[in-house]
């Protein structure tokens, strides 16, 4: 499902995460929770001066902000280009909020540089 077609998550699911976010991020939280509950995301990693690389991100869904989520990204349908990162749900949902806010600005589905640094353990 594309980000454009997401429906906001139920208030009870959103309320658990509300204390973790401020400002515009709170406004995007219902959509981010809805995206999180799907357990996957398809997008394209932008490469400066080159073609975008398609990716599929998958993760395990749980309900509590402090529980860990393992996210796996596979680029270009190639198992050798797979990466995993484990984060607290609240941190991962923050990255999903960034995906949604970025999509609203650019119409592109991609994670932030900060997420990729974490994924590739450069942070």
Image (spheres, rainbow, N blue to C red):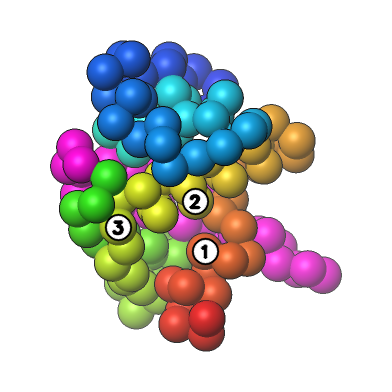
What stretch of residues is rendered in magenta? 39-64
**Label 1: which residue?**
115
Residue drawn at (58%, 66%), measured in percent from left and top? Answer: 114
Residue beneath the point at 41% across and 31% down: 18
Residue that sits furthest to the front in the current view = 19
* Mark number, residue 88: 3
Mark 2 neighbour density, 10 Å: few (under 14) some (14–19) many (20 or more):
some
Q: Position of residue 23 (x, y in %)?
A: 63, 33
Residue at 38% x, 64% y: name it. 74
Which numbered disc flags the more N-terminal residue, 3 or 2? 3
**Circles 1 and 2: CB atoms closer than 8 Å:** yes
Q: Is residue 28 above or below residue 49?
A: above
Residue visible at 28% across and 67% down? Answer: 86
On screen, 114 above or below 39?
below
Helix, strand or loop at disc 3? Answer: strand
Percent across and percent down for residue 22 are 57, 37
């Amino acid at each position: 499902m594309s980000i454009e077609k997401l429906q906001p998550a139920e208030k009870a699911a959103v309320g658990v995460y509300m204390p973790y976010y401020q400002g515009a991020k709170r406004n995007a939280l219902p959509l981010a929770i809805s995206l999180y509950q799907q357990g996957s995301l398809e997008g394209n990693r932008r490469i400066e001066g080159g073609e975008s690389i398609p990716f599929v991100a998958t993760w395990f869904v749980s309900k509590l902000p402090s529980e860990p989520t393992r996210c796996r990204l596979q680029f270009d349908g190639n198992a050798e280009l797979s990466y995993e990162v484990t984060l607290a749900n609240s941190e991962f949902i923050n990255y999903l909020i960034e995906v949604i806010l970025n999509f609203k600005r650019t119409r592109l589905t991609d994670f932030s540089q900060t997420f990729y640094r974490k994924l590739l353990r450069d942070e």
